[in-house]
Image (cartoon, rainbow, N blue to C red):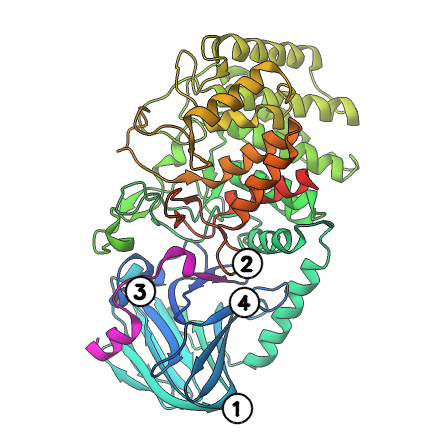
Amino acid sequence: MHPDDAAFLGAEPSPIAHSGLTGPGRSAALVSRAGTVAWLCWPRFDSPACFAALLGAADQGAWRIAPDGPAAPARRCYRGDTLLLEARFSTPDGEVGVTDAMPTGTAQPALVRLVEGRAGAVAMRTVLAPRFGYGAQTPDVSRLEDGSGIRATVDAAGVVLRAPVPLEVTEGTVSARFTVRAGEVCAFVLSDAPDGAVPSAFDPRAAVAETGRWWEDWAARCAYRGRDEAAVRRSLLTLKALVHRPTGGIVAAPTTSLPEALGGVRNWDYRFCWLRDSCLTLLALMQAGYVEEAQAWRAWLHRSLAGRPDRMRIMYGLGGERELTERQADWLPGYLGARPVRLGNAAHDQLQLDVFGEVGMALHDLRAAEAGNSPDGWDTERGLVEHLEEIWQLPDEGIWEVRGGRRRFTLSAVMAWAALDRTIRSAERFGLPAPLDRWRAVRTAIHAEVCREGFDTEKNCFVQSFGSRALDAGTLLIPQVGFLPADDPRVRGTVAAIERELLVDGFVLRYDTAAATDGLPQGEGSFLACSFWLADAYAMQGRAREARALFDRLLALRNDLGLLSEEVDPISLRLLGNFPQGFSHAALLGTAFRLT
């Protein structure tokens, strides 16, 4: 790459919070405030990235469109209730807007970038550097026969760029300088082009307008009305963007290996379908009035289980893939040097008993939303509980996917109880066939064991695992799932203990990584979902003022577009972890509904 092009693209990735998301429900792109697309995987969320500069530098792949000269920092927003991302650049010569959109209706995934003159005449520049295989492969670049753009290919991977301006090609990089005047629109269209194909051209402005209407129509069905409506709608739209429309699977986040501590090793690939995260997303969507996503996910789950509930995994690929082998991308330097960069996730074959609870809760709420009109899936739900009856006393890796050995995690047992509880409720309410006496006995046994083995009488709180004295913010879910009421002295004691030991400047740690045996070096940020759970606990205990104050502090952590990552550094307030994170937005929605 020419040094001038590399300098224009930037030497290192911008802060995580500077990213904006756009996507069509099949894949996603992250765009920085500087106008750089630094992350793009297609045709699926988990496909190899063709832009991976987010995990390294410009030569790992990026695409920037911005003024060719001094410009004020871009002002950004989403166009209404959509994922059309608008940036406005002001220069001494005028003002220009760049709208980024991934159309919902194209045959091949595409990224449209509309450059619109708002005032004056602004000199612009674009540099496109596709690097396939997560930045490992520089493509061959050739011009399209009709002269409308270029094609970049490596093996079976490829992209096609159609542009309204002359393009220069140097060392696998495409660039152009052009001027846009007030009232003019220059449309750049980058399309996925596998196997040497050249996708059909389409009207980019019409496609963007149609995509905007699609998002607006979906958002208009939101049932929430209240003080936090803007935040709720943006979180709902973000969760919707993580739903893979062709299959119904839901990814935890569209990125991999964004670190939970700067320079750290807790860097994970989240572009897969965790059952836990998916169910929390669906519970939030259903609470807002969206049922179709849950129905599509239930069908996805049935396909993924393939008739074997006793072989349920904690996570799958978008198509129900079971093998998600973890490997390291040694050629990538990592986000600001945070290594290793991981592709795939070794947690896919862990035992995490809590997922039975989240699945049971989501399926119960879906059945209630359908008013019990359909017996769909009852055999699967029953099979899951019957398998859980056999394994609920086994040690597991827990909700936080520890890599330091299995234990009897308290929250795992609590969520096993929730699985029994919700499935029993469904059977009772809708007259479904079930061995209710046996299930009730198991539910009672789990409850008794948790209260006996998971509670530390000296500290007056529930602990992370049986026999441990360490705390775990996951126990904040105990009143939420109905295991004990929020005003139970044991719950109050647990909240107080978490306030004493896991709060850093008012934000909640998952657990103390310095004291935990989780198989990893210590150090991470505060976990945003856990901080929302503390706000929930405050609200459920009648501490409304504290709940609102914490919720407002958490809302203030969102970036300028209303997006949240997984964690935050509680001192610098810098967002950390994969971005945007469905878990965080689902927790935000739960608290917003509770406060309303």
Q: Is residue 2 visible?
A: no
Residue type indicated by callout 4: Cys
> What is the C-alpha distance between the residues marked 3 and 2?
21 Å
Residue with the mark numbered 4: 77
**Sequence-first tag of 4 and 3:** 4
Residue drawn at x 31%, y 42% is: 326
* Secondary element at tag 3: helix
Mark 2 is surrounded, within 10 Å at the Cα level, by few (under 14), some (14 to 19) or many (20 or more) other residues, namely: many
x, y percent for residue 375: 74, 34
Bounds of the magenta segment: 1-22
Residue 3 among magenta residues: yes
Residue 182 disc label: 1
> What is the C-alpha distance between the residues marked 1 and 4?
20 Å
Residue 132 disc label: 3
Residue 25 disc label: 2
- Residue 417 sits in quarter: top right
x, y percent for residue 552: 57, 46
